[in-house]
Amino acid sequence: MAFSRILLWLGYALIYYAGLMLVTGLAAVLFGEFNQARLFLLLAFIIATIGLITAFIGQNAPTRENTRDALVFLVVFWLLIPLVTCLPYLSMPQVPSFAIAYFEAASAITTTGASTLNPDTMPKSLILWQSLLQWSGGVMVATFAVVLLAALNLTGIGVHRSTLFTLKKGEIFSRLISIGRLIAVLYGLISFFAFCLLMISGTPVFESLCLALTSISTGGLVPRSGILADYVSGFGVLVLAMVCLLGAANVSVLWDVLRRHNVNSVRALFGNVEHRGILALMIILIIAGFLSTGARHIYTVIIEAAFMVSSTGYDYHVIGIDMVPASLLIALVLVGGSALSTAGGIKIIRMLLLFRHLRTDLDRMSHPLRVKPVKFRGRTVEDKAFLSIWMYFFGYTLVFSLGITALGASGLDFTHAVSAAASALSNTGPLLAATNPETSYADMNVLSLMILTVVMLLGRIEVLAAFALFAPSFWRN
């Protein structure tokens, strides 16, 4: 295994997040928060130094790697980076332990949006830090899906395959920077236009910046407590809803629209099967919301339906999508968005393929001699290729069940355990408030928060990738 190459890229990751700390420290100076500025600048220097040393150790790494190296890097990244980015939270009196700080950082960088903190009592620099973590986490999630997860599933059904995936064998890591830069530019442009439109709509500057960063990453954390309607206009939340849907859309299709900017690329944006699936989930939620709240709150329902299906979960108004039965909200959120996006969940493409395969199997039960292959992206898919998807579905269900059981053992009642586990695994933290408004993450004990941290990280790693590390064959030469 190319451990030195893994160290090289972990060093690059540390340098990147040291850069974000530097930006936050400079912003803290502008906010007049000089204690926070010193903290962020000192941490930026220390982490950058550690990153440079780590990258130096791995500078003589082999130039080629295999999928096993990519999987180890993926898991270590999601475990290590929250360990580093949680350090600024320890300066806050509201964060009494390292476990809670790690929970906050992991929630932000996995774009889950769960928090024990009240933004009204937080320094602006920490709120900006949360927003930057969510934005960078969204870029990382999409980049890893396009490069690492696509490479890990080369022999599978191609859920993560796209026009952006053009690497050759042994060139996985070398594509991370080029693809990451491309996705960062795309999401940066969307965030910039969202910021400008929010400013035009009357949203304050700081809130516009934070919401523009967290909406494209489908993060869910907000710069103020309470509902968005208190400081964002009706036009502003419409902008946020559109940006959240773009965050849940296939990033390779979005890049084609930006690169080609012609009618065919726009048609592909609306014709993509995953995007149609997101629209279908929205329609289901809108109908359920209309039946639950009536026509008077239909605009709120439409906006919050977009927030929920994108796994962002912003709360726009008091009466809205939270009036829909909790079981329906949980089920739709667990489905998730596009496989190549910042959204969480099982992913729509997997569910569509499972239903296609299920329909074929039902036809075979009534007509055993009938030959009816499953078609996907213009090619015939063999039955054995569906094994990985069925195994992923089983693994996802297993983690969900174990999460509920562990949370129940930690002190949560069953209803709250189900909502909290679904929120963490689907990386939709605000789902807990939408389904059980009487409880919050701040009410939970440290053990429950630690369990949720593990579950949200498994949701981002993709459960089968995590399970593979425990297989003896994985470590065998």
Image (tube, helix red, strand yellow):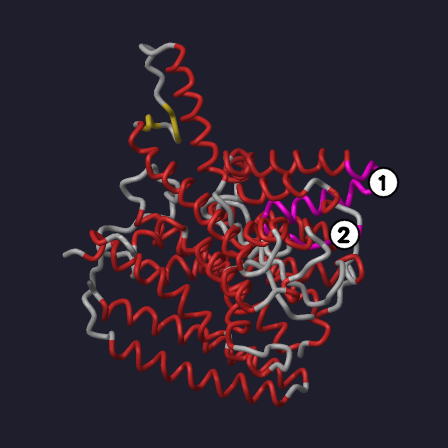
Badge 1 density bin: few <14, some 14–19, many ≥20, Cα 10 Å: few
Disc 1, SS: helix
Write the residue at 80% across / 39% down: 293
Query: Taking 232 as reference, is 139 left or right?
Result: left
Badge 2 density bin: few <14, some 14–19, many ≥20, Cα 10 Å: some
User: Where does label 2 land, which residue?
Assistant: 235
Disc 2, SS: helix
Give the foreground label among 2 and 1.
Answer: 1
Mark 1: amino acid: Arg
- State the image coordinates of residue 330 (x, y, percent, origin top left): 60, 44
* Quadrant housing residue 381: top left
Write the residue at 60% across / 50% down: 414
- State the image coordinates of residue 60 (x, y, percent, origin top left): 19, 74
Write the residue at 46% across / 28% down: 355
Check contact, mark 2 vs mark 1: CB within 8 A: no
Mark closer to the chain start, 2 or 1: 2
Mark 2: amino acid: Phe
- State the image coordinates of residue 117 (x, y, percent, origin top left): 65, 70
* Above or below, comparing residue 388 to residue 442 in the picture: above
* Above or below, comparing residue 124 to residue 358 in the picture: below
Front residue of 112 and 67: 112
Q: Which mark is residue 296?
A: 1
- From mark 2 to mark 1, how far is it between C-alphas? 17 Å
Range of residues picked out in magenta: 292-318
Q: Residue furthest left?
A: 477
257 magenta-colored: no
Q: Which mark is residue 264?
A: none
